[in-house]
Image (tube, rainbow, N blue to C red):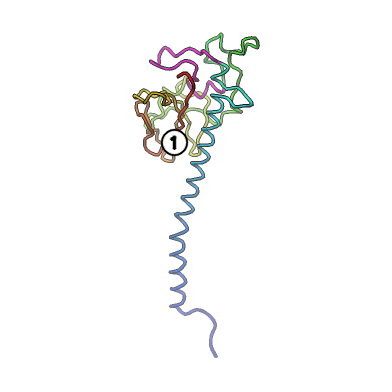
Amino acid sequence: MRKCGLTLLELLVVVAVMVALAAIVVPLLGSSQNDASMAATRTTMLALRDAIFGTDRASGFVEDVGDYPAKAHLAGWPGGWPEKIHDLLSNEHLPAPKQTFDIHTHRGWNGPYLRSADGVYTVDTAHGFTSDYCYNSGADLAIIDAWNHPIVIQYITATVNPGDATVRLVSAGPDGVLNTLPSDASAAGDDIVVPLKRAGL
């Protein structure tokens, strides 16, 4: 009479096959999760771009605010751009004439340009999130990437080719460190960058 069951050798073969399959599948799962996070962050950044420029169905910050003055404390900051993500959600830091929308001139803040903030900007200089990206040393409304870090608007101080964007959106990416500095002409580290281009700049 033969007993049912696996011999020790058969059991070892089954375990070895399962370990080999796990070694193949686990990295693929991790990669697909990271790819999904990257795609979600890029989608969020494109929605921010639409809030800044507008779409076929709705005007954006740039069209409404128009000749929004350059910030005196940011040398070279081009007028007409939101200085911080907070400007897309609240008009409290805009000059008084720009805080309300004028129905006759079609100029002035007509937001919020995003449905809502999903976080608050936190100053974390060790990870590159300085007070340069906020008004109140960390109390500004923020839009968060897939890794729970704020997306920032950056004015590029590096020399760029004529016609290239001089303003961009930057996410710190998976490592959570804002590696791309305003003095960098292109993205650094694993940061995700969306250039913002507008006619006339």
- Measured as percent of width and height from the top left, residue 102 is found at 63, 11
- Measured as percent of width and height from the top left, residue 154 is found at 43, 25
Position of 150 compared to 114: left or right?
A: left
What span is in magenta? 65-89
Nearer the observer, 79 or 111? 79
* Residue 9 location, quadrant: bottom left
Compared to residue 26, the image places residue 131 above or below, namely: above
Q: Quadrant of the N terminus?
A: bottom right
23 within the magenta span: no
Nearer the observer, 63 or 188? 63
* Label 1 CA crowd tier, 10 Å (few <14, some 14–19, many 20+): many
- Measured as percent of width and height from the top left, residue 131 is found at 42, 23
67 within the magenta span: yes
Q: Quadrant of the C terminus?
A: top left
* Residue in the picture at 42% in, 37% down: 176
- Which amino acid, by three-letter code, is at mark 1? Ile
Nearer the observer, 137 or 106? 106
- Measured as percent of width and height from the top left, residue 87 is found at 53, 20
Compared to residue 73, the image places residue 48 above or below, namely: below
Q: Residue furthest right?
A: 103
* Residue in the picture at 45% in, 69% down: 15
Q: Residue furthest bottom?
A: 1
Characterize the magenta stretch by its predominant secondary structure.
loop
Q: Residue at label 1?
A: 192
Position of 177 compared to 40: left or right?
A: left
